[in-house]
């Protein structure tokens, strides 16, 4: 799918081809990102080299340290790439904390290249890059106060995440990139969540949207022919403010005014278009797009022309420099900038490549998309259930097949002029209100929906609960063939209901459903005269008529019958090391049968790693619909299992339905032997004096901190005293032993036992004399 070149290959009214999209753009790395199997192999090489190091003599250990340094560097590069490619797989291939601790001690010069487990918190800057080839990338920059971290989520991100939120994540960090196992918003940018004070909300989704547009050029790259101030004025504000006329008179301001029923607008009187300014470099060093450098230098170039605190959006129009491979880049929400002489200001920021907006049509469609990100909307996706046979909607637990730009009826999706959907308009924009514009439907009856383009606004959407007793919803709206925007859409949408789906995974996206599911989302409406019976609930929808600018719908909730569904299963932790020869996991299963079903028995099985013994406790669980249970999975390797990381799986079944989840287990290298060097000073003391006992703990000649060291002192009468001390960073444990006045004179013998990592070692025996 060619998101921003679509008009070159099809007319607006033609059928639209939708494909499943990738999520990381290939231009982000100089070489293809590694697969999880490649990182897995590097893990095993490093673990086995570590095992050789633990058994090596000092001269050989020095050589192995050199090999380890190269291998750790290679693995660090691959692991960071894997986080960006697939954070969930990165978490499964992250080395456990205790293994990392041993690696750091063995290879201290490479410690900074190894990952770390932890929790991080900071203020989020969230951008979305939209590429001409139909891919995208979410860029989450967490500013902790000391540094900027890139956040990649292994699962769904916190709902409605946006710039300015104070975000807390838990996961694994490599370099400045974090694979987040989970996260939560400590404080939202709008102050809606209690906790630490968040950044103030400065960009409203209603009222005046003042846009400062800056055209820039680079020493080696110029703006595309025809892209100038007049074209941008037309794109943003229409024919009345531009010498470059267009028919129809599309503009961002007009689009917003119509879509919002006049609640949001971008008046020319409150905006400015400036430039082009010639910046002093090309921003493409090493093939990397320096978009923040472009922004800051563009602000500096226009600083004497524009008073930036007056504007809620800043748009940078730039030439194609060969490295900024996106068509457009927009912040999800607003963030603060302090780089101008006007002081700090907060705005939404947009970057657009000039070769993508050479016409009014392209410019309006791209700008309403990127500025839509500023208004906190994520993409308008599609959700398919290909079967076979293909169906409009799967079971409650079925996530379907997501296509990131798959909604060809909203400008936040596929390249089109469609208005932002009712779901976005209520949830993200505040343009619609419950009861007045959105009617929540949970009972059977006949309902009427006003055409979405009609003003004044009445009920423009129904939010229909998907059957009794669940938290999933169908957003139903009706588009009319009128005006200069929605009239550009595939005409089949005007024949009935346009329906989006909302469940716990939707967040700040919208998910379009296809009620003619054999046509790849080019014709999606549930048309007049059709009835859809949800096969997984008691809901049915009948589209009765279109009359007088209204769509008439009958909603029925019939008798609830049992519909079994595959369970949801998860396993935790995603990777761990053996403890006392076993690895133990928590396996959580949820019964996703609908409420009409009776309790079911869920059984557990696991056949990976091959040859390992498996124990579930308990071995099964009886759950009612909607209930969850957690069982313990214990894995024990056969004797002689080689050092390395192994896949662990779990399969949960009830009846013919099942679900699975995977994790990893790491078999660490046997720790190196400990040595304990014990000394005493002085060797002869009078009674009522102190003797200093020193035990230095080494492993392959390297000091071992945090070892447990037990000193034992035996006096001349064979009476013993013991004390346990922890070694310091230099590997030394100290006990200042006091010989009291009434203690016996003669020779005292001293020994020490050190334990660390499951190993123990006894020192040499030393003595001192008390007189």
Image: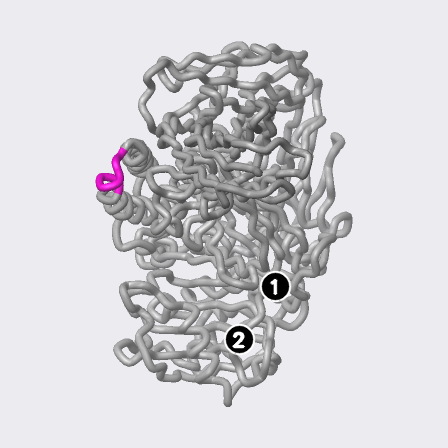
Dominant secondary structure of the residues highlighted in magenta in the image: helix
> Which disc, if any, is residue 258?
1
- Most distant residue in the bottom direction: 304
Asked which secondary structure carries label 2, the reply is: helix
Query: Does 606 appear above or below 114?
Result: above
Task: Give me the residue at 67% from left, 66% from top.
Answer: 200
> Where does residue 373 sit, x and y in percent of width and height?
53, 59
What's the CA distance linking mark 1 and mark 2? 13 Å
Task: Give me the residue at 61% from left, 63% from top.
Answer: 258
| Residues packed near mark 2 inside 10 Å, few (<14), some (14 to 19) or many (20 plus) | many
Of 320 and 27, the residue lying toward us: 27
Q: Is residue 296 left or right of residue 65?
A: right
Magenta residue check for 60: yes
Of 101 and 506, the residue lying toward us: 101
Q: Are marks 1 and 2 in contact (CB under 8 Å)?
A: no
- The magenta region covers 56-61
Observer able to see residue 94: no
Magenta residue check for 143: no
> Where does residue 649 sit, x and y in percent of width and height?
44, 22
Q: Quadrant of residue 629?
A: top right
Task: Give me the residue at 64% from left, 15% from top.
Answer: 562
Of 741 and 690, the residue lying toward us: 741
Asked which secondary structure carries label 1, the reply is: helix
Task: Give me the residue at 51% from left, 68% from top.
Answer: 349
Which residue is label 2 attached to?
A: 237
Q: Quadrant of residue 183?
A: top right
Q: Is residue 45 left or right of residue 529?
A: left
Tell me which numbered mark, 1 or 2, is placed earlier along the sequence: 2
> Which disc, if any, is residue 345?
none
């Amino acid at each position: 799918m060619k998101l921003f070149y679509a008009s070159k290959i099809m007319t607006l009214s033609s059928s639209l081809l939708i494909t499943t999209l990738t999520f990381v753009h290939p231009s982000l790395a100089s070489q293809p990102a590694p697969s999880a199997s490649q990182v897995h192999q590097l893990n095993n090489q490093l673990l086995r080299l570590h095992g050789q190091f633990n058994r090596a003599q000092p001269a050989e250990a020095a050589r192995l340290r050199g090999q380890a340094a190269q291998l750790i560097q290679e693995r660090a590069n691959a692991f960071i790439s894997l986080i960006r490619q697939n954070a969930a797989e990165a978490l499964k291939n992250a080395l456990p904390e205790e293994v990392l601790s041993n690696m750091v001690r063995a290879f201290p010069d490479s410690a900074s290249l190894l990952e770390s487990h932890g929790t991080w918190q900071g203020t989020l800057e969230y951008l979305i890059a939209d590429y001409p080839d139909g891919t995208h990338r979410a860029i989450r920059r967490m500013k902790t106060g000391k540094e900027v971290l890139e956040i990649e989520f292994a699962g769904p991100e916190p709902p409605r995440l946006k710039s300015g939120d104070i975000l807390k994540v838990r996961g694994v960090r490599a370099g400045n990139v974090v694979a987040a196992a989970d996260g939560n918003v400590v404080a939202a940018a709008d102050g809606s969540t209690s906790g630490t004070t968040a950044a103030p909300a400065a960009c409203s989704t209603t009222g005046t949207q003042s846009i400062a547009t800056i055209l820039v050029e680079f020493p080696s790259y110029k703006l595309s022919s025809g892209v100038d101030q007049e074209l941008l004025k037309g794109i943003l504000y229409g024919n009345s403010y531009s010498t470059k006329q267009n028919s129809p008179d599309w503009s961002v301001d007009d689009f917003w005014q119509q879509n919002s029923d006049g609640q949001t607008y971008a008046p020319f009187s409150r905006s400015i278009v400036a430039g082009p300014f010639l910046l002093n470099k090309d921003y493409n060093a090493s093939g990397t797009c320096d978009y923040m450098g472009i922004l800051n230098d563009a602000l500096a170039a226009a600083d004497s022309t524009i008073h930036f605190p007056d504007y809620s959006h800043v748009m940078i129009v730039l030439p194609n420099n060969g490295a900024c491979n996106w068509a457009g880049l927009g912040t999800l929400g607003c963030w603060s900038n302090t780089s101008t002489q006007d002081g700090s200001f907060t705005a939404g920021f947009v970057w657009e490549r000039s070769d993508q907006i050479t016409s009014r049509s392209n410019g309006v469609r791209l700008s309403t998309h990127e500025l839509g990100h500023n208004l906190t909307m994520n993409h308008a996706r599609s959700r398919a259930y290909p079967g076979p046979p293909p169906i409009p909607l799967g079971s409650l637990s079925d996530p379907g097949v997501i296509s990131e730009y798959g909604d060809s009826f909203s400008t936040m999706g596929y390249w089109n002029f469609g208005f932002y959907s009712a779901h976005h308009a209520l949830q993200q924009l505040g343009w619609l209100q419950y009861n007045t514009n959105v009617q929540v439907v949970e009972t059977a009856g006949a309902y009427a929906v006003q055409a979405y383009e009609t003003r004044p606004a009445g009920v423009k959407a129904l939010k229909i609960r998907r059957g009794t007793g669940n938290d999933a919803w169908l957003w139903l709206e009706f588009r009319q063939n009128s005006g200069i925007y929605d009239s550009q859409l595939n005409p089949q949408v005007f024949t009935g209901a346009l329906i989006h789906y909302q469940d716990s995974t939707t967040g700040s996206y919208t998910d379009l459903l296809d009620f003619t599911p054999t046509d790849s989302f080019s014709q999606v409406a549930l048309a007049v005269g059709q009835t859809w019976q949800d096969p997984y609930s008691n809901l049915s929808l009948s589209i009765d008529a279109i009359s007088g600018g209204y769509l008439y719908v009958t909603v029925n909730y019939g008798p609830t019958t049992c519909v079994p569904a595959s369970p949801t299963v998860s396993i935790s932790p995603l990777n761990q090391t053996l403890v006392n020869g076993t690895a133990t996991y928590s396996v959580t299963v949820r019964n996703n049968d609908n409420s009409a079903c009776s309790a079911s028995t869920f059984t557990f099985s696991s056949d990976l790693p091959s040859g390992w013994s498996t124990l579930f406790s308990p071995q099964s669980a009886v759950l009612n619909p909607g209930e969850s249970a957690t069982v313990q999975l214990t894995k024990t390797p056969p004797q002689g299992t080689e050092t390395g990381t192994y896949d662990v799986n779990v399969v949960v079944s009830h009846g013919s339905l099942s679900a699975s989840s995977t994790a990893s287990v790491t078999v660490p290298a046997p720790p190196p032997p400990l040595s304990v060097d014990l000394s005493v000073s002085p060797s002869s003391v009078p009674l009522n004096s102190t003797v200093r006992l020193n035990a230095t703990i080494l492993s392959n000649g390297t000091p071992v901190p945090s070892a447990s060291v037990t000193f034992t002192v035996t006096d001349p009468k064979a009476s013993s005293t013991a004390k346990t001390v922890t070694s310091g960073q230099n590997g030394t444990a100290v006990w200042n032993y006091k010989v009291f006045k009434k203690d016996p004179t003669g020779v005292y013998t001293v020994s020490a036992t050190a334990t660390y990592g499951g190993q123990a070692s006894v020192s040499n025996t030393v003595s001192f004399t008390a007189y």
